[in-house]
Amino acid sequence: MKVSVRHIKGLHFQGEGSSKVLINIDASVTAGGTGHGVSPMELLLMSIAGCSGMDIVTILEKMDVKFRRFETTVEGERASDHPRVFRDIEIVYKFWGEGLTKEKIERAVQLSIEKYCSVANMIDKAADLTYRIEINS
């Protein structure tokens, strides 16, 4: 796997992988950036949600579990001193739909976090990674 990241201006960069999709990376205006992209640390949290979300959708499809809506929020608490790594990260998986089976959703999430999601498994070695599930009808 290989990506390239090109400097645009100031703290604004554009990343590109083999998919040829451009991702804008930037610092917030308060941190000296232009705000034209997500910060690298935000991108890391999004990567956890995207990676585990893809696993969960695939696993639930195999279990024949149908949901109407699925969203993930990820919140990270960073150290106050540099390098300001994430110390604690909480993932909240939110599902909407009729007749959702709590046991199957819990199993899908558990398989993703503990076995399949490379990003979550890598981050769990550096931060306290926790999750919870919310099921709404």
Image (cartoon, rainbow, N blue to C red):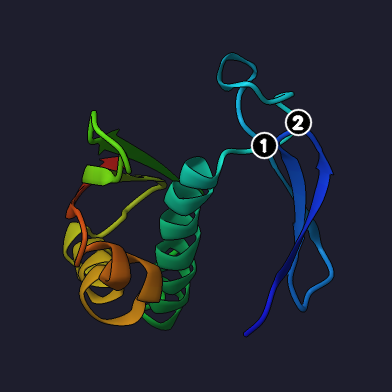
In the drawing, does residue 16 fall left or right of residue 57?
right
> Callout 1: helix, strand or loop?
loop
Mark nearer the N terminus (1 vs 2) = 1
Q: Quadrant of residue 15?
A: bottom right
Q: What amino acid is at disc 2? A: His
Image coords of residue 2 (percent x, y): 67, 81
Between residues 90 and 60, which one lies in front from this camera angle? 90
Residue 73 visible to an observer of this rendering: yes
> Callout 2: helix, strand or loop?
loop
Q: Quadrant of residue 32?
A: top right
Q: What amino acid is at disc 1? A: Asp
Count residues near mark 2 (Cα–Cα under 10 Å), then give few for <14, some for 14-19, many for 20+. some
55 relative to 41, above or below: below
Between residues 1 and 129, which one lies in front from this camera angle? 1
Image coords of residue 112 (percent x, y): 31, 72
Could you say which disc has been placed on residue 85 in the image?
none
Residue 89 visible to an observer of this rendering: no
According to the picture, the residue beneath numbered tag 1 turns out to be 26
Between residues 24 and 108, which one lies in front from this camera angle? 24
136 relative to 17, above or below: above
Image coords of residue 12 (percent x, y): 75, 38
Count residues near mark 1 (Cα–Cα under 10 Å), then give few for <14, some for 14-19, many for 20+. many
Asked if the residue under mark 2 is in contact with the one under mark 1, i.e. CB atoms within 8 Å, the reply is yes
Could you say which disc has been placed on residue 36 in the image?
2
Q: Which residue is drawn at 53% across and 48% down?
A: 43
In the drawing, does residue 19 fall left or right of residue 64?
right
9 relative to 103, above or below: above
In the drawing, does residue 81 fall left or right of residue 37?
left
Q: Residue at x 33, y 80 (%)?
A: 116
